[in-house]
Image (cartoon, coloured by chain):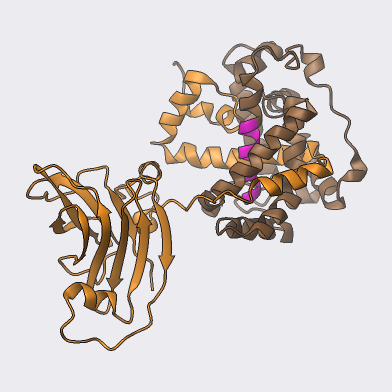
Chain colours: A brown, B orange
Amino acid sequence: MDRLRAVAGEGQEPSPAVDQLSSSLKKCARGDQAAFAAVYDLTSAKVYGLVLRVLRDPAQSEEVVQECFLEIWRNAGRYDPARGSASAWIMTIAHRRAVDRVRASEADTRRDRDYGAATQPIHHDETAETAEARLEARRVRAALDTLTPMQREAIELAYLGGYTHSEVAAMLDLPLGTAKTRIRDGLIRLRDTMGVGPR
Amino acid sequence: MSGDIHALSGAYAVDALDGQEREAFERHLATCSTCQAEVDSLREAAASLSETVAMTPPAHLREQVLGNIATVRPLPPVVRIGQRRSSRRAWLSGALVAAAAIALFVVWVQPGRQQAPTLSAADQIIRAQDVVQVSQQLSSGATVTWYRSAGQGGAAVSIKDLPAVPSNKTYELWLQSPDGAMHPAGLLGGGTQTVALTGSAKDSIGAGLTIEPAGGSASPTLPPVTVAAFPKV
């Protein structure tokens, strides 16, 4: 549990994989397709997993993942390391595309506003993950445990569920403006616990 | 919209704002670096959530993704004069540059050559031992190459196919000093030409081209036709 206690103002030491992702992305900007393959191999599980979690449909998810990586390739030169990690830059693209796709499909019955159904976890194959990924996932879940249940649920509905803060408020029976406060407070706590964020 | 707009940063960071609220917050973000920094840091936190749902995609997806990019050209980076994001004097935002659709190729120092005394001012700069050049392609199809030699203390520009402007207008060149100010550096018309910029470019950090009323202006009219940052040698 010591690993969770962030030293104020300092981030985690970047792992070798983090450095590789950043430098591979830089090479993509110059048209290096081998570097792009490395970017894919380092991030495809998180991108696909997130998109699938938001969209729930595997076929649509594959389409959106293709769109994500095309955008990543085209815009690699626009990634600014001073503003954040390469991983967060990539996941921001993935999340935005997943949410855009979900909101575009008006009649999408998969977007179940019933709270219970929306939070059904998708069974995922743990053996497919690397040891490092499982370790990271455990670390994040432990950090999430430091949030209040309401903060955690609000964040998971918004981020993993792709719902707007108004929808989240309705689903959690909160007054209209309250969900966005929970989301912000929870993210700040998550950020500080994990030691990511402002340099 | 009632309430504190800054409080929307968390919802924005997880794409939980929609429609008008999102647009309003994005307008706010353009003016509030505190919020932008917070959004960036909260996005880092949010991104870590993807670790909890990571799943290896089907094998065929890799081939499709790698195949998709084979014929797609990565976009060039956005040019910022002086590389000073927070400077209020930075006269060009990334959005303006992106809108101008400039392709930037930076080529480093040219091999030195014996300088002949009969060369024009522009050629002396272009052939200087310490010259750096910045090449650009404008959305009009014109190409612009900037040259700067700190040793010669001058800058030059070589332009091909610059569109003509009406008779009540002129193109104007600018040199940017380290404090961010833009200094007039000469007037020119459309077409193809190579000229030296007037004034000392010894300490200049960049240059630009704008359209001004005939006779030129003392300060640039935005948005510029193009701008370039001189790479440090």
Q: Which residue is drawn at 62% across and 30% down?
A: A185
Front residue of A161 and B213: B213
Any part of residue B63 in sight = yes
Q: Residue at x 70, y 45 (%)?
A: B65
Report the residue that reaches farthest toward the left.
B215
In magenta, the rendered stretch is A86-97
**Image quarter of residue B83:** bottom left
Q: Position of residue B8 (x, y in %)?
A: 52, 26
Any part of residue B153 in sight = no
Q: Where is residue B90 in the image (x, y as percent from the top left)?
A: 31, 50
Above or below, B22 relative to B50 = above
Q: In this view, does B111 lie to the left or right of A93?
A: left
Front residue of B213 and A46: B213
Q: Residue at x 48, y 39 (%)?
A: B36
Above or below, B60 relative to A64 = below
Q: Position of residue A43 (x, y in %)?
A: 73, 47
Q: Where is residue B46 in the image (x, y as percent from the top left)?
A: 66, 37
Above or below, A83 relative to A14 = above
**Image quarter of residue A121:** top right
Residue A183 magenta-highlighted: no
Residue A87 magenta-highlighted: yes
Q: Residue at x 60, y 56 (%)?
A: A28
Above or below, B83 relative to B120 = above
